[in-house]
């Protein structure tokens, strides 16, 4: 049964740790009635530095509830930054808190180890609810992990709802290239297969920050001027993760940018960008129908060299989300608004073919009615 249509705000702070994305949509959790405005609250460099330290600290967590002093400080920052993002968004768009039915709050992942049944997204959903006075759905990954899934990716059911709005060809691949890359394959009969493909922007961004002080390789210019190390790429792509059949998910720190060694900035960027592109293209080996179209969203959609390499290695057409009328930058934020409504209506967020969970499973914790 279809639930009530709600106006939802989705919030996303991804593994690139650049800021908080805000997006508004109207949905019943199955279909999308319409999209509203979007917003963004950037992290300052000192805030990014704290979050990078929190990521290191989080990798050593042994349980979901422990917060070292550093992690507690980072969690307070995440909660405050998301509250500020929503408050500024409402003011900028002439909206009141009463206009919003629910907020989908992902938080900031500091560790994702489904093999240990462990995923931690810092951010206090209850405190966010108390400050904003709007119901908040948070902790969206844990129920799936507890039920035997990978806890990721969560967005495929939203990808299918998006694709249903457009006359897009099938089979179709939707790729989100954030810090980690993941793909949703939508088959000829709308069946879903989804999993993390490998590194996304994380290695390239880390390389550029260390070598140049810049946060990213803008439009892939540095990579386009370098030459990838073919021997290293061949070695990297025999890593067991790439041969493992889905479901599978990846922690941001599973690979490190220093794998390229002491090479020029250009050649290192070229190697890491090619690594991302080839690992995404190889994901098609795990589905019976090779996609005729790949739609790229997330930060990777702004990297022309990555898009060129993906088209070459996938041997298929590649388009950005914008090219098909989507928002590459805000798609994940929109997705978490959509998932929050699904959670409130008791609808499944994850499926055996997307996370490996034993049966279709809902999730999320609701703070405030």
Image (cartoon, grey):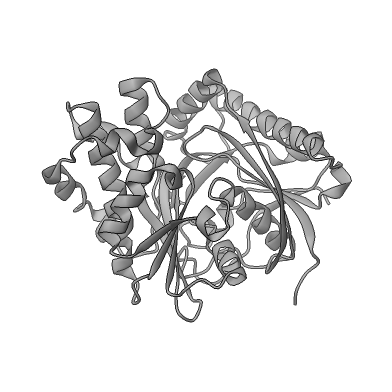
Q: Residue at x 58, y 69 (%)?
A: 166
Q: Is residue 328 above or below residue 164?
A: above
In the figure, is residue 32 to the left or right of 350?
A: right
Q: Residue at x 49, y 21 (%)?
A: 49
Q: Is residue 10 above or below residue 149?
A: above
Image coordinates of residue 95 in percent, x first then y, are: 84, 42
Image coordinates of residue 19 in percent, x first then y, are: 57, 33
User: Can you name the residue that lies furthest to the left here?
Assistant: 231
Q: How many marks?
A: 0
Image coordinates of residue 108 in percent, x first then y, are: 55, 38
Q: Residue at x 46, y 57 (%)?
A: 150
Q: Is residue 81 visible?
A: yes
In the figure, is residue 329 to the left or right of 229?
A: right
User: Can you name the residue that lies furthest to the top here?
Assistant: 46
Q: Residue at x 52, y 20 (%)?
A: 45
Image coordinates of residue 188 in percent, x first then y, are: 45, 80
Camera-nearest residue between 268 and 149: 268
Camera-nearest residue between 220 and 348: 220
Residue 41 found in image quarter: top right
> In which quadrant of the rendered image does the N terminus lie?
bottom right
Q: Is residue 178 visible?
A: no
Q: Is residue 20 above or below residue 364?
A: above
């Amino acid at each position: 049964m279809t639930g009530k249509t709600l106006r939802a705000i989705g919030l996303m702070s991804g593994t690139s740790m650049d800021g908080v994305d805000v997006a508004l949509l109207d949905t019943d959790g199955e279909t999308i009635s319409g999209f509203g405005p979007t917003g963004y609250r950037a992290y300052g460099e000192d805030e990014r530095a704290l979050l990078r330290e929190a990521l290191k600290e989080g990798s050593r967590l042994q349980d979901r509830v422990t917060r070292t002093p550093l992690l507690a400080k980072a969690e307070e920052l995440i909660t405050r930054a998301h509250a500020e993002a929503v408050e500024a968004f409402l003011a900028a768009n002439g909206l009141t808190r009463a206009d919003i039915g629910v907020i989908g709050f992902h938080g900031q992942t500091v560790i994702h180890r489904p093999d240990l049944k462990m995923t931690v997204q810092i951010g206090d959903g209850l405190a966010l609810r108390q400050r904003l006075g709007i119901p908040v759905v948070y902790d969206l990954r844990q129920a799936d992990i507890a039920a035997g899934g990978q806890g990721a990716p969560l967005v495929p059911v939203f990808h299918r709802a998006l694709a249903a709005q457009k006359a897009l060809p099938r089979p179709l691949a939707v790729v989100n290239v954030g810090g980690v890359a993941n793909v949703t394959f939508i088959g000829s009969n709308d069946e879903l297969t989804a999993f993390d493909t490998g590194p996304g922007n994380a290695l390239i961004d880390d390389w550029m920050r260390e070598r140049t002080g810049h946060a990213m390789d803008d439009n892939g210019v540095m990579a386009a001027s370098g030459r990838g190390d073919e021997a290293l790429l061949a070695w990297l792509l025999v890593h067991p993760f790439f041969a493992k059949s889905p479901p599978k998910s990846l922690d941001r720190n599973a690979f490190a940018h220093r794998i390229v060694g002491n090479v020029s900035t250009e050649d290192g960027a070229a190697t890491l960008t090619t690594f991302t592109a080839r690992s995404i293209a190889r994901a098609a080996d795990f589905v019976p129908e090779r996609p005729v179209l790949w739609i790229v969203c997330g930060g990777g959609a702004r990297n022309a060299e990555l898009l060129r390499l993906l088209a070459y290695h996938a041997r298929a057409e590649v388009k950005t989300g914008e090219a098909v009328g989507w928002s590459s930058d805000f798609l994940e934020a929109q997705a978490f608004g959509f998932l929050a409504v699904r959670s409130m209506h008791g609808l499944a967020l994850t499926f055996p073919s997307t996370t490996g969970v034993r049966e279709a499973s809902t999730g999320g914790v609701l703070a405030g009615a």
